[in-house]
Image: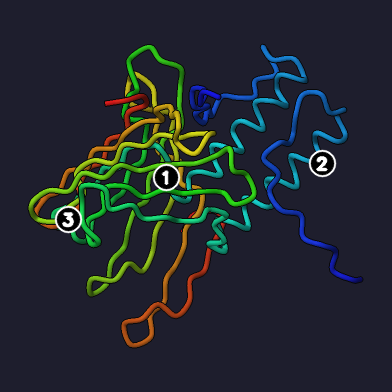
Amino acid sequence: MTTPAYIALDDTKPVGTQNALAAMTSSRDNMNALRDMIAGGMLVWDYVKSNGNGTDEQPQFNIYVDPTDTTHWLRAEITWDASGFVTRIVWDWSNDYFATSAAIGYEDYTYTGDNLSLSSWTYGAP
Amino acid sequence: MTTPAYAQFLDYKPDFAVNTGAQGIDWVRRNLLALKAMPVMGSMLGLSTDGADLSTPDNYYWQRSDFAAGQRQDRKLRSKNTWTDGSLVRQEFAWDLQVSAGGDGWVFFAYIDYIYTNGILATSTWYEGTV
């Protein structure tokens, strides 16, 4: 049997206007694509570092862009402590190249010695 | 165009007890989109550890940090870790419901073994079930 063309993740599916058969097929195809992304590390996201107020080693922003869906951008604003540990990451997203954005949430990191011992996720803006 | 509020992953959606078929399908898409972000953004769950030496923690725990008493049940996850000479050789995974009383008890459902050659990971093998 010839291997068929690969079915990549489709952000627009499933949608409530599909009939049941089409929606189930879209759901299965997208779940398989997500499984492949996670298992194979085939991230669909392009990565752009933006130093902002930081440095090459400790950038202020990491930005992730889906090249197939330019209306879905993610941005991480990183806070570093004096020892070089990340203490907070604030996430927001944008559908217009960050002309506007909306908060997703933020994660605080606690260390015991050099070991990460606790992280805490909170939805919304800090 | 203003960026709309983010649609977070909800582990209790779709719920066909309250959603119509079309609503349920839309919830599937929203959750898939939230899952798509997790490889770069993380699980949006808090992580905690325990054990005498936190460079080789006995357990990892993932759960919602903002869980409040009386809130809808949510899933929490645990990895029970086995270390040899500082290398992680086995993780046993369990889940529980995050409820006000603390949970019903961990149910282990799978594990993974890591084998090293000269200190470098050579193979990992995933098993369904318990050790």
Q: Position of residue B19 (x, y in %)?
A: 69, 15
Identify the secondary structure beneath mark 3: strand
In the rendered structure, the answer to whether residue B71 lies left or right of residue A14 reads: left
Q: Position of residue B38 (x, y in %)?
A: 48, 45
Q: Which residue is mark 3?
A: A115
Circles 3 and 2: CB distance less than 8 Å? no
Amino acid type at image mark 2: Thr
Residue A81 vs residue A69, the one in the foreground: A69
Out of B27 and A62, give the one closest to the viewer. Answer: A62
Seen at 36% across and 31% down, the residue is A105
Which chain letter matches label 2? A
Q: In which quadrant is the N terminus of chain A drawn?
A: bottom right
Q: Is residue A28 above or below residue B23?
A: below
Q: Which mark is residue A25?
A: 2
Instruction: Return the mark for residue B41.
Output: 1
Number of other residues with Cα within 10 Å of mark 1, as a class: few under 14, some 14 to 19, many 20 or more:
some
Q: Position of residue B84 (x, y in %)?
A: 27, 72
Q: Which amino acid, by three-letter code, is at mark 1?
A: Met
Residue occupying the far bottom of the picture: B118
Amino acid under label 3? Answer: Asn
Whether residues under marks 2 and 1 lie with C-beta atoms below 8 angstroms apart, the answer is: no
Please tell me whether mark 1 sits on a helix, a strand or a loop: helix
Which of the pair A48/A109 is nearer the observer?
A48
Give the spatial CA distance, label 1 vs label 3.
20 Å
Secondary structure of residue under mark 2: helix
Which subunit holds the residue at mark 3? Answer: A
